[in-house]
Image (cartoon, rainbow, N blue to C red):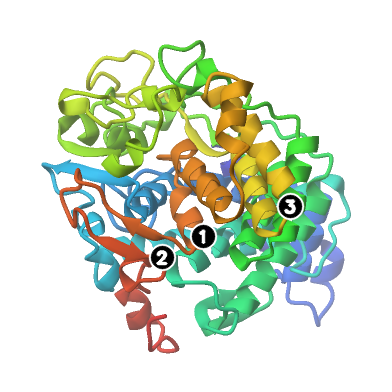
Amino acid sequence: MKKSVFYAIAITSILSVGCSEEFLDPVRNTNVITSEDLANYSNNNPALVAGTLEGIYSYMVQPGGTSGISSHYDLGQKGVDIYLDILSGDTALSANTYGWYQNTANLVTTVDFTRAENRIVWTYYYKVINTANIVILSLGGDDAIPSSTVGKQIMGQAKASRAYAYFYLAQIFQREYDPNQEILPFYTGSQAIPSKVPASQVYDLILDDLTQAIDYLNGFNRTLKSQIDVNVAKGLLAYTHAAMGNYSEAKLVSEDIINTSGYPLTTVGQLAFPGSGSGFNNVQTPSWMWGYDITPDMGHQLVNWWGQMDYYTFSYQWAGDRKVIDSGLYSQIPAIDVRKNQFGTSGITNGMPINKFFDPGRTAGGQQAITTDYIFMRIEEFYLLSAESSAKSGDEATAKNRLKQLMSIRLGGQANADAYVNPLSGQALNDAIYLQTRLELWGEGKSYLALKRNKATSTRGTNHVFRSGQSFPYNSDELSFQIPQTEFNNNPSITTQN
């Protein structure tokens, strides 16, 4: 915080004072700083924009007010993850005492552009984009090549952050990938197009940003897992290729992450309580590639992802707005699978992830000052994405090998994994990989992306309060968000929904 204030003061000083030679130049207005000036200052001292970059990571975990709405489900990226998990159908709202998420679960929000949830998602990602653009402009703009290593590392993180935000916007606000459909307003450091541009233009920027980010972040040794490094940028690139149907490219990037990143698979003990090191609550877990260390000084309490998902945190999951695994999905977990132990089986905790996401104190409603961490990405995602992309691009041998590596840990050994995977081929192999993706990444915000990639239909089990037993294709109106009313009010270039 002190550093951010210092950088702000430094930039303010630059804006206010010109050097003496320029002051004597009658053509030069020293009361106005140009983007070229700021780029020169930032290239010489990249720390001037480091505080702005850190602001992006802060947005990702900011509780309440991220979008200007004081709401108990305005939680940054993890708040969006809950929306998406509910839309996918894999997370069931099984009790709704306080009313949070009822309009998302009832699929009202996604067909009513006046609902606040649409504004929360839209504004959050455009806020990330705007801040990333400020950093990029400060370093010379989209086409600039920073002169210092630190400048390149900051530029790489900013471009990857912008790509991340545009990727999620495209996934959430377009029903299905169509490169020709006009979908989003388009803002970069050099362009401001308030009307919707084709998806191809958005995805081209995402690919360009991530490709350059990977180049600039090569060799960057981050100090915090909240920062985007080269492997996180590669992960976002793999997801982008897969969303576009570029399965050969998605496979290559996923394989590169597996083979070069050094991240180990989550151990059987870490997967479920009471295993050794269990609980998806610690950013230092070796398999986590991207996450955020939540500390007491951040002041997270009632309004927090943990409050919405963890029975052992004092908030809504404990008090009566229960998010649980869909009953139909749970029924597909075999008894020998350690992940079956991640969920409660009786009473009010039935179906809750009490042994996957939990405060280590394990006292019902006990954690009030939040210290449990956020997960954004882990290595298992790319074993599964490699398997999926390999199967879809015709390389069943690689698909089965990666799936077996994952399943041998979850099913109690290689023999069980072989017995499960070896008979699979064709559509049955694709279906198995999709199922394992849903089971493995339950509650982590990734099931929705897999639903769209696989062009699947979501059928809700019996434990949903709303729309129980109903089915929704991946591209139905109910499963994508609406451009919010505020955008229509403030941007006359937007006149239609996607």
Label 3: few (<14), some or many (≥20) within 10 Å?
Answer: some
Q: Name the residue under label 1.
A: 454
Of badges 1 and 3, the one in the foreground is 3
Residue at position x 69%, y 76% from top? Answer: 190
Which of the pair 459/453 is nearer the observer?
459
Label 1: few (<14), some or many (≥20) within 10 Å?
Answer: some
Q: Is residue 495 above or below residue 254?
A: below
Q: Mark 2 points at which residue?
A: 474
Relative to 477, 149 lies left or right: right
The answer to whether mark 2 and mark 1 are in CB contact below 8 A is yes
Going from N to C along the chain, the mark reached first, 2 or 3, is 3
Q: In this view, does 485 lie above or below 223?
A: below
Distance of mark 2 from mark 3, alpha carbons? 25 Å
Distance of mark 2 from mark 1, alpha carbons? 8 Å
Q: Position of residue 218 (x, y in %)?
A: 83, 44
Count of numbered badges drawn on the protein:
3
Which of the pair 461/210 is nearer the observer?
461
- Pick the quarter of the image with the C terminus: bottom left
Q: Position of residue 121 (x, y in %)?
A: 39, 60
Q: Position of residue 64 (x, y in %)?
A: 33, 47
Going from N to C along the chain, the mark reached first, 1 or 3, is 3
State the SS at label 2.
loop
Amino acid of disc 1: Asn
Amino acid of disc 2: Tyr
Q: Position of residue 16 (x, y in %)?
A: 66, 61
